[in-house]
Amino acid sequence: MSKLYRWLVRLFTAAVLLAGLTVTAVYVLASRSVPDYDATYHIAGLSGPVEIVRDTANVPHIFARTDADVFFGLGFAHAQDRLWQMILMRRTVQGSLSEVFGRRTLQIDDLLRRLDLYGAAQDSVAAQDDWTRAALDAYSAGVNAWLAEVNSRALGRGAPEFFLFSNEMAPWQPADSIALVKLLALQLGPHARREILRARVSLALPKERVRDILPDAPGTGRAALPDYAALFPGMVTRQYAQNFPQDPLSPLRDWGLGSASNVFAAAPARAATGGTLLANDPHLELTAPAIWYLARIELASGGVIGGTIPGIPAVLSGRSAQLGWGITSAYMDDSDIFIEKLNPKNPQEVLTPSGYKPLETRGSIIRIKDEPPVTVTLRWSGNGPILPGSHFNLGAVTPEGHVAALAHTIYDRTDTTMTAAMHLMRAGSVEEGLKAGELFIGPAQNLALADQKNIALQLIGRMPERDAAQQSYGRLPVPAWREENLWQGTLPYSANPRFLNPDSGIVGNTNNKTVERPFPLHVSFDWGDTQRIERLSHLMQSREVHTRESFIEAQLDTVSFTARALLPLVGQDLWFTGQPAPRGTAEHRRQRALDLLANWNGEMNEHMPEPVLYAAWMRALQERLVKDELGPLTAEFTRLQPLFIERVFRDMDGASAWCDIVQSSPRETCKDMASLALDDALIWIGENTGGSLESLRWGDLHQARHDHTVLGGVPVLRWFMNVRQSSSGGDNTLMRAATAGTRDAPFANVHGAGYRGVYDFADPDSSVFIIATGQSGHPLSRFYDNLGDLWRRGEYIPMSLDPALARAGNVGITVLTPAGAQRQNTERTQAGMN
């Protein structure tokens, strides 16, 4: 027995030692890809030395004698810190994820191959001006220089993920950067998916009820839409629909998580210090690391600092010494779904206004890890790529004998969006910034500008020119064989809305409706916000003059205008009614919940119980209202639709009909629905939280989920890769923290301001910014999530162009020096840049 015991001890000890050695080996290998920021590299392809000074927050400040070398340094720094992110985004837009992840991503690759965004990017390289092409060449050379260093020095493959997945990667090239901009355009543009959803709802409901659940943004004028079935006689509701996989690797997520951002600026007359102010916080999906990366580059025209996206050599939101700029998604209707009628005698032809014409067809091979490759046939009509019914639920709205094509402005093969972004960094005034915007194609954005004296808000991006007789006003898929439905090109830049130095002294946008113009100059019928703008307007008007601090306060505001508006409406017949109930009863719990909400100011604070009660009640209420009418389509409306609830409880155009349960004999009232939904909410809270209502914390249910795209769901590894934080805010607060809407974690914070910046031109170097995680994409780096706590607490770091401040307390200075003979293309690059 003692002998057996000794052997068991030996085996256990050996297993522990083996496990320890394995963990140590993994750590050593993974840690080799943590960059040494205090290093000197001798690199061919430079005209002179490049200095990358990383300040105390690991923000690189890049200095060189020429602009080409500066962009080389930016590419080098991006690749050092975010190589995995860059390669993953490139694989996504190329449709080559399956080479790494296998069949899991085949449908994603299938869609991206059909869209051919990468092909459009390749064609667009030649459309950039000489300076931009040279910058793209230099940036690509910088990325590739780091790849060469990784390979020559065995620096852990460049990122720890490459130990788990294929590290096969082609050199970076200019088309890759342009393609990432097009990928963003695809992610930010909701209109095509809204068209399909509207068509599906139209097939299930009468048009007056469609107007309830998918209402127009408030404002005068409304287009009277036809029933979708009327556009295609004989069309009936179909259950063919297959949802696009909600994989973290998919660039297309739930339509309810569309982009959302805030930007606002004050003229000198509205600023306490007499200088302009500008604040911007673009909202995207929360990830670890954040999609944003802070950087400063010193160009010949002056220093530029702000938020970049690794892979794109431009500061997308930031400032120079003379000009600040910020962006929000414009929600311009820049895409349409066209239903193409196939020739019954030849399915490779579609009907056009001038007869049947052949589709453009070519094959594309998708390589799949550990499986034989798959060949997909890509087809294009004159309107855009043909998409199968399995994408975007198109099968549910495509009649037999027809196919669907997607038209989008980003297919422009002479897209100069990259040139516009690069010119903006060199603009020295609002006037020059507005001029740069003319070259912008997509994604459509609201560009806010502020120089020392002026402010402006300009919609940038090409707007499709539609016929005034278009059958659905761009809001439903339409027959492509009717001339009046087709695009007639794009409108001139002068047609885009512009607000320059308004009398109010304030410009701002929260993705809200900006203009009321008749179709086809309408810009859009679907906007990204109807709620946050009310709160922003109140905060901007509540002060005669503003300061940097008041702009920060507005950016971090967590008061829900929506809660303040809906609760009195929904609960008006429930508050202060009924007899007192004994403790411990359901009636007492209901009364206590109503008391808490009656005395609540609408602040979605992470430490308070009221946001939990409000969010759970509204979620339960909306589900009760729509479930019997929409059936399976209920899954498309898992987040609160404030205008819908308001229409129902105000009985606008008979919308209170939603309160009646169709399957029941009695006629239920909206008061009945409100009461039943409150009970539903309290039951859900009891089952999922426990304890008293007063002990609830919104932050416990509303954790910010910065999850690693690939490893965030892997046991053990997720504890190292994911960043989770208790957070305030909600779907409709200025500090937007959009909820997941899923069954398992409906109130998790998954979408918000990954970047925040406030620029003060009374004292530019007092400007501040922050990102949601950290600069590094390496979980073993101390800069992986070091900015996360600051972001959660609403704090910022300095945004200074002062070189001395960057050098003070720096965490490392990387020096790149020329080595060997210059490559032939170096002379061409330098000639283009100078």
Image: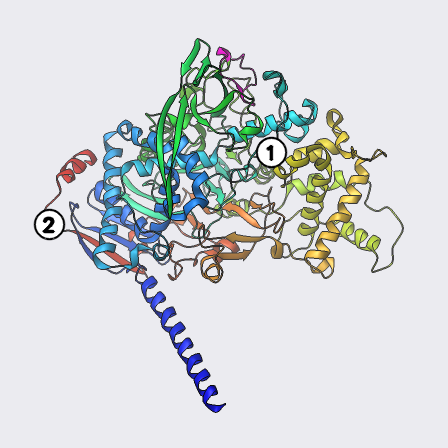
Q: Quadrant of residue 458?
A: top left
Q: Judge by depth and name the residue closer to the eye, 459 or 384.
A: 384
**326 relative position to 258: left or right:** left
Image disc number at residue 530: 1
Q: Judge by depth and name the residue closer to the eye, 643 or 359.
A: 359
Q: Amino acid at mark 1?
A: Thr
Q: Quadrant of the C terminus?
A: top left
Q: Which residues are magenta?
A: 468-484
Residue 733 is one of the magenta-drawn residues: no
Q: Amino acid at mark 2?
A: Gly
Q: In the rendered view, tell whether residue 723 sits above or below residue 270.
A: below
> What residue is at 70 percent from the left and 60 percent from the top?
695
Image disc number at residue 18: none
Badge count? 2
Location of mark 2 (residue): 820
Q: In the rendered view, tell whether residue 399 sits above or below residue 135.
A: above
Residue 476 is one of the magenta-drawn residues: yes
Counting from the top left corner in percent of width and height, residue 455 is at: 44, 33
Q: In the rendered view, tell whether residue 72 sits above or below residue 438.
A: below
